[in-house]
């Protein structure tokens, strides 16, 4: 997976810059903390990689562009993007793969009500934000 060769370092850098723990990232992506630790593992034999849905969740929830996590500037790049969980071969039905990608994008997109709640939350005072988080069981 040449697009993920430096993902473990990029993820750690983004996580540390945002002052996020591995548990925070795990909760964002809906996975166990041990999985995030394996994404950041320096030992290739212990390393694993996120799927498309986890990548999308991570990008959306940390406001990080996908190209900041992936190695898209590799030499010899033929323009093909190979993401884990979304692989193509010449015999694959492209429309089915695009439908899968569209479903994944729809899954992580906020509804109008969710977007409005988020806008209101961001505009509220820090005291109100803390109160809302306490009510929700932060």
Image (cartoon, grey):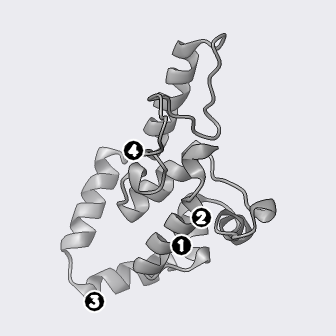
Q: Find residue 15 and report its horizontal and vertical position in percent.
A: 48, 74
**Tag shown at residue 29:** none
Q: Residue at x 55, y 80 (%)?
A: 21
Instruction: Choose between 82 and 37: the one closer to the eye.
Output: 82
Classed neighbour count for the residue bearing mark 1: other residues with Cα under 10 Å, few (<14), some (14–19), many (≥20): some
Q: Secondary structure at mark 2?
A: helix
Q: Please name the residue that numbered disc 3 is placed on.
A: 127
The reply to whether discs 2 and 4 touch (Cβ–Cβ < 8 Å) is no
Q: Please name the residue that numbered disc 1 is placed on.
A: 12
- Compute the Cα span from label 1 to label 4: 25 Å
Instruction: State the residue lying farthest toward the front.
Output: 75
Disc on the earlier residue, 2 or 4: 2
Q: Please name the residue that numbered disc 2 is placed on.
A: 8
Q: Nearer the viewer, mark 1 or mark 4?
A: 1
- Compute the Cα span from label 2 to label 4: 25 Å
- Compute the Cα span from label 1 to label 2: 6 Å
Q: Nearer the viewer, mark 4 or mark 3?
A: 4
The reply to whether discs 4 and 3 touch (Cβ–Cβ < 8 Å) is no
Disc on the earlier residue, 3 or 1: 1
Q: Is residue 96 above or below residue 130?
A: above
Q: Secondary structure at mark 4?
A: loop
Q: Which of the 4 quarters of the picture holds residue 41?
A: bottom right
Q: Please name the residue that numbered disc 4 is placed on.
A: 109
Disc on the earlier residue, 4 or 3: 4
The reply to whether discs 1 and 2 touch (Cβ–Cβ < 8 Å) is yes
């Amino acid at each position: 997976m040449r697009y993920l060769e430096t993902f473990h370092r990029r993820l750690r850098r983004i996580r540390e810059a945002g002052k996020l723990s591995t548990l925070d990232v795990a909760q964002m992506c809906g996975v166990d903390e041990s999985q995030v630790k394996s994404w950041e593992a320096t030992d290739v034999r212990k390393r694993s990689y996120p799927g498309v849905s986890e990548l999308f969740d991570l990008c959306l929830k940390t406001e990080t562009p996908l190209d900041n996590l992936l190695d898209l500037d590799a030499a010899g790049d033929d323009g093909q993007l190979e993401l884990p969980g979304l692989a193509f071969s010449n015999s694959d039905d492209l429309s089915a793969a695009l439908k899968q990608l569209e479903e994944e994008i729809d899954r992580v997109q906020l509804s109008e009500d969710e977007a409005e709640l988020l806008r209101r939350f961001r505009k509220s005072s820090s005291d109100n934000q803390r109160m809302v988080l306490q009510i929700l069981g932060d």
